[in-house]
Image: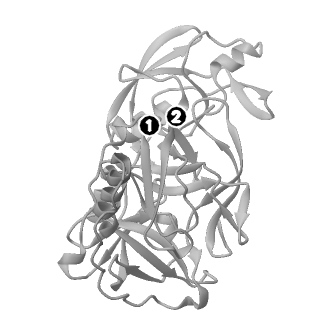
Amino acid sequence: MRWKNGFWLWLGLGVLLSGCRSLPLRELIFVTPTPRPGGAVARPAGPTPTLPPLPAGLDEEEQRLIAIYQKVLPSVVNIDVEGVEISAFGSGSGFVYDTQGHIVTNNHVVEQAEEIWVTFYDGTVARARVVGRDVYSDLAVIRVDVPPELLRPAELGDSETLRVGQKVVAIGNPFGLRGTMTLGIISALGRALETPTRFQIPDVIQTDAAINPGNSGGPLVDLEGRVIGVNSAIRTDSSAMGIPANIGIGFAIPVNAVKRVVPQLIREGRARYPYLGISATAGISLAELRARGYDVPDVRGVLIQEVQPDGPAARAGLRGGTREVQVRRASVRLGGDIITAIDGHPVASFDELVSYLVNRTEVGQTVTLTILRDGQEQQVQVTLGERPSP
């Protein structure tokens, strides 16, 4: 990752992993920060004006969207950052997590910041400090000391109950335009974004709600006004004023990751992840290998490519591939163990395995893997380690 024109940019990330054919991403962009001219710190804008009565003739959905905006906006903040390696001031978004002054945003918003300033919905500005950051989930927590009446925690939803086609809204500060709301739908669920750490963020939400530079860290909410995700990245092929902009493919970190990671960041300043210690074919399925004529079993599962030396999988005796072939210009090793289930839960893809490990297991926990080796099904117990630092 690098700083360019005031925003974090992932160029040539390569693939979007979704348990099916890998999709090349020409540009996958962290959608913050957007530059602030002159680097001036925002000043209070004065008291929030009294809202006028609603105009006549609004339909039910319009009234609902207005109610969502009025409910969520007081929880959303603008985040201005400045750092030694940052060529200009930049701005992102965040939302109030609790009444102790904790605010959730993206890790990439604040990871290189030396100064952080938070602007609330009424224009109040306060200096913030980083409490904890997690590169694996792209989540971070910052804290401010402000009057309690400014701290209106956002209501958190449940990302496991989401369905494709649900209407959602994004509220944030695209291009520094504070308090912007956009409307869209959930376009897909269960996406997996590969980070520069080579690990994946599982269960990512894809949406066509317009998300642009400056939206990062802001909430994606359902029509009840509950946060269901944290806006983080977009796919782009175009640009606005030289800054890549949204084309209807945005990604949000699921709120259940917030529920899991943020308490750890507040408590310890870091998050812990279970670690199996294998690499696998994330974008090439066993079905595709069979269709291409390779001799692989007719099952759904995870074909182990490599086993990390001295890792949990190696200590449990799992085996990686022994014969390398080329599939879609990628190297694939055949002959390794195939994981078909974990603790009795079937896994059809590497994404599903990662999701189970991240969401349902802990460091030090012993899990039972069902594997297929040389045509024979076996049960293997593995005690999970802790994911190493990037």
Q: Element at badge 2? A: helix
Do callouts 1 and 2 mark residues in contact (Cβ within 8 Å)?
Answer: yes
Residue drawn at the location 47% of the way across and 64% of the way down: 107
The quadrant of the image that shows the N terminus is bottom right
* Residue 110 in the image, given as x and y percentages of width and height: 48, 72
Query: Residue tagged by mark 2?
Result: 351
* Residue 177 in the image, given as x and y percentages of width and height: 51, 74
Residue 310 can be seen in this image: no
Quadrant assignment, res 155: bottom left
Quadrant assignment, res 279: top right
Residue drawn at the location 60% of the way across and 38% of the way down: 17
Query: Residue tagged by mark 1?
Result: 355
Q: Amino acid at mark 2?
A: Asp
Q: Amino acid at mark 1?
A: Ser
Q: Nearer the viewer, residue 368 or 244?
A: 244
Q: Name the image colouring.
A: one colour
Q: Residue furthest front?
A: 56
